[in-house]
Amino acid sequence: MIENLSNKIRNFWNKGFWYKAGIILLAILVWPILLFILCYYLYHKFQNPFLRWGSIAAVLIITSPISIGWVGGIIGSSPSPQPKSQETTQTEIQISPSTEVIGEQTQATNPPQETIIPTSISIMQQVKVVRIIDGDTIEIEGGQRIRYIGIDTPESGGCFATQSTNKNKELVEGKTISLEKDVSETDRYGRLLRYVYVGDVMINEALVKEGYAQVYTYPPDVKYNERFLAAQVEARNNNKGLWSSCQNTPIPTTKSTSTQQTISTPSPTTPPQSSGGGSCKYSCSSPDRDCSDFSTHAEAQAFFNCCGFSANNDPMKLDSVGVGDGIACESLP
């Protein structure tokens, strides 16, 4: 009750001056006049001073809560005017995409805004694998083929091609997978370009990490290029898969149905090993090489990948200064 009364008094003092003045004047005049009449009556009724003043004191004590309630009732029963700020909201507010306003005026002058859904979030598509084409290509329900982004496995008949295909079968055949798009939708053969997941495992990366595939960089689909290069260095340093089994056999990395546009990555005569290990075209440590040491972009890119270089790790500056996209000697044919 006391809290309710205090709220009423607080609201009262937020009123305008003339409103407060009128209410206070009414409270001062009406109730005191009633008390005065009652006290005047008691004063003249009792001749004994003790009874006279005792009765007046008792009346004042008994009526004091009523006096407070009288004032509070007058203050609380008065209708509070609508705040000006609320009126301003109804007439002057401007609608933005992040503001929701319900009101007759805003609905009349501002039509509903379209909801914009962010498109930067990767949306995983769930599909089932029905057939394995080779180490980096699969077929899903409906007949659509999927080409793994960022990697390349040996061509049919090449060293370690059978093992790569079998590993791909082991990982995804008959399973429900998740597909993540990068930039490109399909290659020129109509195959979807995707990162493929089984649970939390990215199959593209797993094949490279275990030595069943090499990194195949082709912009603009380079979202996980750094991860793939790191996985390749790990596989090469640990002589996993094709890095130990194909020492004397070229590893075809340009497939008969080229995956992405016209880039062709020539296969090394021997698989790359650790930086500076001597299995790449040149030493990965010294002497320093530049684009004039290569006849084609594809040859430079093969050396760049072989050494495990990247946009952020390019000691020989084969990636153009200021570009930093992981592509070596782009000016070469």
Image (cartoon, rainbow, N blue to C red):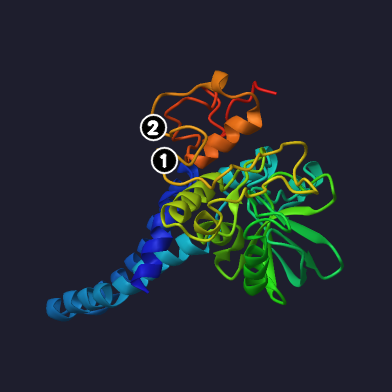
The residue positioned 61% from the left and 58% from the top of the image is 204
Numbered badge on residue 246 = none
Q: Determine whether, in the image, residue 38 is placed left or right of residue 55.
A: right
The residue positioned 86% from the left and 68% from the top of the image is 142
Q: CA distance from mark 2 to mark 1?
A: 7 Å
Asked where in the image residue 39 lies, by quadrant, the reply is bottom left
Q: Secondary structure at mark 2?
A: loop
Above or below — where is 28 with respect to 168? above
**Residue 258 horizontal/vertical position (percent):** 77, 45
Q: Amino acid at mark 1?
A: Ser
Q: Amino acid at mark 2?
A: Ser
Q: Secondary structure at mark 1?
A: loop
**Residue 28 horizontal/vertical position (percent):** 38, 56
**Residue named by callout 1:** 275
Whether residue 42 can be seen here: yes
- Crowding near the residue tagged with mark 2, few <14, some 14–19, many ≥20 C-alpha atoms within 10 Å: some
**Residue 147 horizontal/vertical position (percent):** 73, 55
Asked where in the image residue 87 lies, by quadrant, the reply is top right
| Nearer-the-camera pick, 171 or 96 | 171
Number of marks? 2
Whether pointer 2 and pointer 1 mark residues with C-beta atoms closer than 8 Å, the reply is: yes
**Residue named by callout 2:** 285
